[in-house]
Image (cartoon, helix red, strand yellow):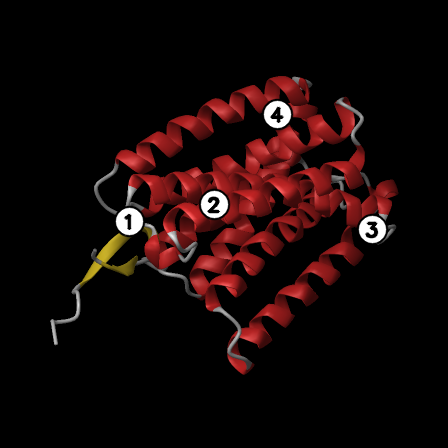
């Protein structure tokens, strides 16, 4: 019997509790940061999308060209996907008049299509398989769609669904709790559970972000978008520094 392949390291972090805490903080920052640029600075959704899309492309190229896992680079790229996802979804839903329902359905289709194409081309969408530029590209495109979908889905739940920001946050938190229970109590595919949790953290962050900075009359706390964004950025940095992350392991091929 040939020896088992030795584990090699990926350029994405090991999935653990710290990963999910930072991910939720990053998705919340995406909402407050995106709104700060497009709304508080009055640049509009289209200009905001252009700014964040440029930052996203730079971050993704740096991430793909990196030779090893860099926590600050990885989370900067994740944060870039959340901010551009916020402004892009708002532009499509509001400026183009597609609406939250239509925007959510379109983005869900794009997300599922990205996962299906990724699986068809590379055979798996597991995080442990992300060790080639091709897999990384699929990974970041899929994340981009999931972050944009999350903004539209969060707005749909809070506004169209009539749940309000706090109510929508409780619903998405509850759905995440179901995923956690599935992880510990069932044999459901870990890959399916990962992507389900990854997708759900975005609308949770979106409605929490809106809850922080929307007017009191609209159900929010009316906090400064700049202050909320700065505090969330500080929490992300503190999480990275206080809980050093390891690169995910993957089998060499």
Which of pointers 1 and 4 lies earlier in the amino acid sequence? 4
Q: Assess whether mark 2 and mark 3 are in contact (beta carbons under 8 angstroms).
A: no
Point out the frontmost of discs 3 and 2: 3
Q: Which mark is residue 77?
A: none
Which of pointers 2 and 1 lies earlier in the amino acid sequence? 1
Q: Which mark is residue 37?
A: 4
Q: Which residue is mark 2?
A: 234
Kind of element beneath mark 2: helix
Q: Which mark is residue 164?
A: 3
Which of pointers 3 and 2 lies earlier in the amino acid sequence? 3
* Residue at 66% from the left image edge and 53% from the top image edge: 204
Query: Which sits in the foreground, 250 or 209?
Result: 250
| Cα distance between the residues tagged 3 and 2 | 27 Å
* Residue at 52% from the left image edge and 26% from the top image edge: 52
Q: Which residue is mark 1?
A: 131
List x then y, in percent, for residue 98.
78, 30
Kind of element beneath mark 3: helix
Q: Is residue 52 left or right of residue 89?
A: left
């Amino acid at each position: 019997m040939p020896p088992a392949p030795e584990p090699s390291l990926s350029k994405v972090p090991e999935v653990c509790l710290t990963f999910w805490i930072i991910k939720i903080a990053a998705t919340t920052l995406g909402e407050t940061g995106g709104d700060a640029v497009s709304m508080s600075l009055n640049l509009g959704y289209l200009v905001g999308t252009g700014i964040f899309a440029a930052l996203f492309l730079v971050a993704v190229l740096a991430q793909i060209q990196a030779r090893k896992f860099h926590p600050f680079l990885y989370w900067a790229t994740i944060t870039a996907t959340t901010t551009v996802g916020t402004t892009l979804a708002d532009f499509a839903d509001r400026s183009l008049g597609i609406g939250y329902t239509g925007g959510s359905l379109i983005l869900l289709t794009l997300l599922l299509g990205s996962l299906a194409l990724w699986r068809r081309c590379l055979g798996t969408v597991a995080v442990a398989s992300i060790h080639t530029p091709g897999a990384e590209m699929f990974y970041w495109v899929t994340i981009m769609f999931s972050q944009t979908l999350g903004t539209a889905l969060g707005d749909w739940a809070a506004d169209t669904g009539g749940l309000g920001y706090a109510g929508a946050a409780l619903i998405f938190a509850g759905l995440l709790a179901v995923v956690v229970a599935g992880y510990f109590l069932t044999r459901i595919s870990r890959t399916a559970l990962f992507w389900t949790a990854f997708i759900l953290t975005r609308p949770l962050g979106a409605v929490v972000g809106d809850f922080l900075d929307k007017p009191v009359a609209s159900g929010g706390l009316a906090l400064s978008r700049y202050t909320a964004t700065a505090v969330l950025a500080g929490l992300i940095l503190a999480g990275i520094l206080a809980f050093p992350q390891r690169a995910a392991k993957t089998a060499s091929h």
